[in-house]
Image (spheres, rainbow, N blue to C red):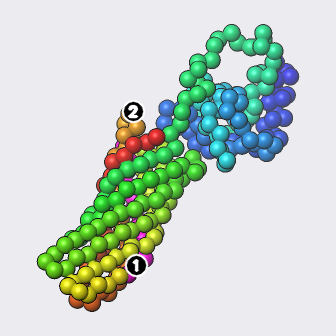
Amino acid sequence: MRRWLLILLLSNILIGAEVLRVGSDLRLIAVTHDLTRRWQVNDRVCVVQESKELDCGVVIKSKEKFSIVKLKEGSSQIARGNKVVSDVRSQKPVALLSSEPVPTTLLVEPLTFHLLSVGGSIGPKFFYPSLHFQRIIDPQIAVGIMPSYLNINASTKTLSSISVLLTGNYYPSEFFKELWIQGAMGLAFMSTSSGTIEQQSASFQALATVGYRLKTELKIVLGIAGGFQYLNDPKFSGLTLNGVGFKPVLVLDAGVNF
């Protein structure tokens, strides 16, 4: 016992791994890598607080900047900043380990770092249908790409627009769930024709919203957000566009987390 406490104390000092985020069910946490090595899948680790062991578990996903650990029980005492150390007891001979089998699902449970959704941006007299693909790159941040397409025919005039926005998404609670803060920027490629006259433009477009996402057990994700959109006016002659400049916008989408 003394040997274990000594190793734990030394690990707490020398190893720089710590908890980044605790999942809503308390058993799933994101942790940084330590100073000497990157955690690998199936590594066993423990969370400690002031040299007191809070819970232990196994690494089920290893990313470049962080790893995901599934804890044995989960604890409300675990918080961001708690130290994470290697479970030295797992290095003992097999005969000395607990005879309790480790469920296979604990080692191979897939994590879902992507979201593909379909929706649109609604504003005063305009609507842009869109797709949005996101990928988690940090326990709270996802980057994405959002293409959208618009085509309007009115009498002898037509307007078409293809937008491509790069998005940054912040989820302080859980992947693709609850509070959702989004920023985006890119280009809208617009063209218009009136009779034999055609005009084209590439206009800067930006989006800033705050919203909420609901994620079901089937990993269906519904989102709603409000904010502002900016679209640079291409100043097509003979045509006035809705939605240019700064406009309030409502974003609605539905997708799947995979």
Q: Is residue 207 magenta?
A: yes
**Mark 1: few/some/many CA within 10 Å (<14, 14-19, 20+):** some
Residue 126 appears in the rendering: yes
Query: CA separation, marks 1 and 2?
Result: 40 Å
Residue 87 image-quadrant placement = top right
Amino acid type shown at disc 1 = Ser
Magenta segment: 201-214
Asked if residue 39 lies left or right of residue 136, the reply is right
Residue 14 image position (x, y, % from top left): 83, 41
Pick whichever, 234 or 94, lies toward us: 234
Residue 170 appears in the rendering: no
Taking the spot 35% from the left edge, 82% from the top edge, the residue there is 200
Asked if residue 31 lies left or right of residue 238, the reply is right
Considering only order in the chain, which callout, 2 or 1, is on the residue closer to the N terminus?
A: 1
Pick whichever, 188 or 66, lies toward us: 188
Residue 121 image-quadrant placement = bottom left
Asked if residue 210 lies left or right of residue 153, the reply is right
Residue 240 image position (x, y, % from top left): 24, 83
Residue 56 image position (x, y, % from top left): 66, 27
Taking the spot 41% from the left edge, 49% from the top edge, the residue there is 116
Residue corresponding to mark 2: 217
* Circle number at residue 203: 1
